[in-house]
């Protein structure tokens, strides 16, 4: 076969399929699709393939263009049972937070406008008052995410100076955030204190030099220190810092305002405890256990927050209006004492296991198949490693679990399930109630394509 037999783009556009392509996608995209498809055909022919007809080329170009127009960032149904799933966008927003984003996105807003004075205002004001009222901190600053919060704090407060941190806390969390690398980027010098499993207060004491600017404590996040281990408490570090005039920065990670221990989980350090222990500066994420949008929150006294706010890096990591709208609405849930019912991740954490079981049972009834098994949900998001909540899972016993999972991911919206003990399982705890009809539709469609074993007895549990 000869490459010369391939048509020109112009000839393809003159056929009836070509005209339709132009109408559907407009000239720029239609041309791009035809050119790329012709390139693909050329490669095929060189590899020994047949020369396609004009109609085939245009049809394939149309499929290409259709694929380009499907957004790759789209909602999915999280049936994994991991509540703060980093790959699936961490915390879903509350109805009020979504509404706030919508109303601010649709038009102009008071982002940096002081209505009573009719003059320029500060974007900080929207969240600072809420954060200080809620936590008792003197001042607050919101940035793009917690990694940015830590980078800003270290750059503004410890550049060219020494930062002490325990070797037990030199963590790497997902997405390439490593405490030693962030320190390096900030221009601060990392001074490792103690050993991998045990660090004592006197290790910090002896590490202090005239160049020391800051003591940092980092939440272990996604791992657990067990066995023959010790670390000084935050309060001890604060007392030491005070003696030597050093800033104590607490990277709290998940930023819980509510005690997870009330729900049968381990205790995740709370923002209030850090404040009570007297940390000079506290940093945490807005989209982990706070349950809001991606953001990094810094709490401290007026002077230290002002130093951070004035640093040029603060401008580079400032949050946008959509983030501030969602964060304000999320914080209001705490202020109104309705976080457990309004904030999705807290609703999931607080959901009684009986309710989860009832939902799994309803799914089985609706599908006419599957089996209920006991399992566990996890909090995720670098909080509470090894901790889990009891749950009930709907296990599908038909087909190959990996193939079932792939078919579920191909649904619209995609359903992300989990494979446990060679079975495909779905955890109702992380499925938002309003997504249930779509979930059941996706499941029914996948199951109708899957051959059923003859021994199957619906409803067997
Ligand atoms: C998650 C986490 C971070 C990073 O926060 P992002 O909001 O993802 O940037 C930093 N430190 C700790 C301890 C964390 O758990």
Image: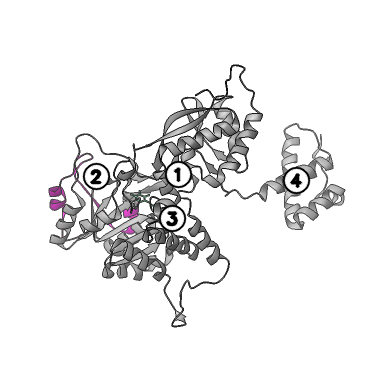
Q: Which secondary structure, mark 4?
A: helix
Whether residue 292 is visible to the viewer of this picture, yes or no, is yes
Dot 4 or dot 3, earlier in sequence:
4
Magenta run includes residue 252? no
Determine which residue is flagged by label 3. 292
Q: Position of residue 133 (x, y in %)?
A: 32, 65
Above or below for 92 versus 423: below
Above or below for 329 versus 36: below
- Residue positioned 52% across, 45% down in the render: 433
In magenta, the rendered stretch is 182-211
Dot 4 and dot 3 residues touching (CB under 8 Å)? no
Measured in 3D between alpha carbons, the distance from the residue under mark 3 to the one under mark 2, in whole angstroms, is: 31 Å
Above or below for 397 versus 232: above
- Residue positioned 59% across, 42% down in the render: 437
Q: Position of residue 189 (x, y in %)?
A: 26, 55
Measured in 3D between alpha carbons, the distance from the residue under mark 1 to the one under mark 3, in whole angstroms, is: 13 Å
């Amino acid at each position: 076969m000869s490459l010369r037999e391939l048509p020109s783009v112009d000839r393809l556009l003159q056929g009836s399929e070509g005209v339709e392509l132009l109408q559907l996608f407009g000239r720029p995209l239609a041309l791009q699709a035809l050119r790329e498809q012709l390139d693909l055909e050329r490669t095929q022919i060189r590899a020994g393939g047949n020369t396609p007809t004009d109609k085939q080329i245009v049809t394939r170009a149309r499929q290409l263009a259709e694929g380009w127009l499907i957004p790759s960032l789209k909602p999915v149904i999280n049936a994994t049972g991991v509540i703060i799933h980093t790959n699936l966008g961490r915390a879903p927003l509350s109805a009020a937070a979504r509404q706030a984003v919508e109303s601010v996105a649709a038009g102009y807003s008071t982002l940096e406008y002081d209505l009573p004075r009719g003059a320029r205002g500060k974007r900080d004001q929207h969240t600072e008052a809420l954060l200080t009222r809620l936590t008792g901190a003197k001042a607050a600053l919101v940035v793009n995410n917690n990694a940015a919060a830590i980078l800003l704090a270290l750059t503004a407060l410890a550049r060219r100076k020494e930062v002490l941190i325990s070797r037990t806390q030199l963590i790497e969390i997902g997405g390439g955030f490593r405490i030693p690398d962030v320190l390096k980027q900030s221009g601060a010098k990392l001074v490792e204190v103690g050993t991998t499993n045990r660090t004592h207060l006197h290790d910090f004491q002896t590490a202090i030099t005239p160049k020391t600017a800051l003591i940092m404590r980092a939440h272990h996040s996604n791992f657990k220190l067990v066995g023959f281990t010790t670390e000084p408490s935050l309060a001890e570090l604060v007392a030491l810092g005070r003696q030597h005039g050093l800033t104590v920065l607490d990277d709290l990670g998940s930023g819980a305002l509510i005690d997870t221990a009330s729900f049968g989980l381990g205790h995740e350090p709370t923002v209030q405890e850090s404040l009570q222990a007297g940390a000079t500066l506290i940093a945490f994420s807005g989209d982990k256990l706070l349950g809001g949008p991606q953001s990094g929150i810094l709490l401290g006294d007026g002077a230290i927050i002002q130093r951070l706010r004035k640093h040029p890096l603060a401008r580079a990591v400032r949050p946008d209006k959509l983030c501030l709208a969602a964060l304000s609405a999320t914080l209001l849930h705490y202020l109104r004492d309705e976080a457990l019912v309004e904030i999705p991740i807290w609703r999931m954490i607080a959901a009684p296991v009986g309710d989860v079981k009832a939902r799994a049972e309803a799914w089985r009834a609706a599908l006419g198949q599957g089996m209920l098994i006991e399992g566990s949900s996890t909090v995720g998001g670098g909080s509470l490693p090894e901790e889990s909540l009891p749950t009930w899972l709907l296990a599908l016993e038909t087909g190959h679990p990996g193939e079932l999972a792939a078919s579920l991911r191909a649904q619209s919206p995609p359903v992300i399930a989990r494979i446990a003990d060679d079975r495909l399982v779905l955890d109702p705890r992380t499925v938002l109630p309003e997504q249930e009809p779509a979930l059941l539709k996706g499941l029914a469609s996948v199951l109708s394509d899957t051959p059923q074993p003859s021994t199957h007895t619906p409803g067997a549990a």
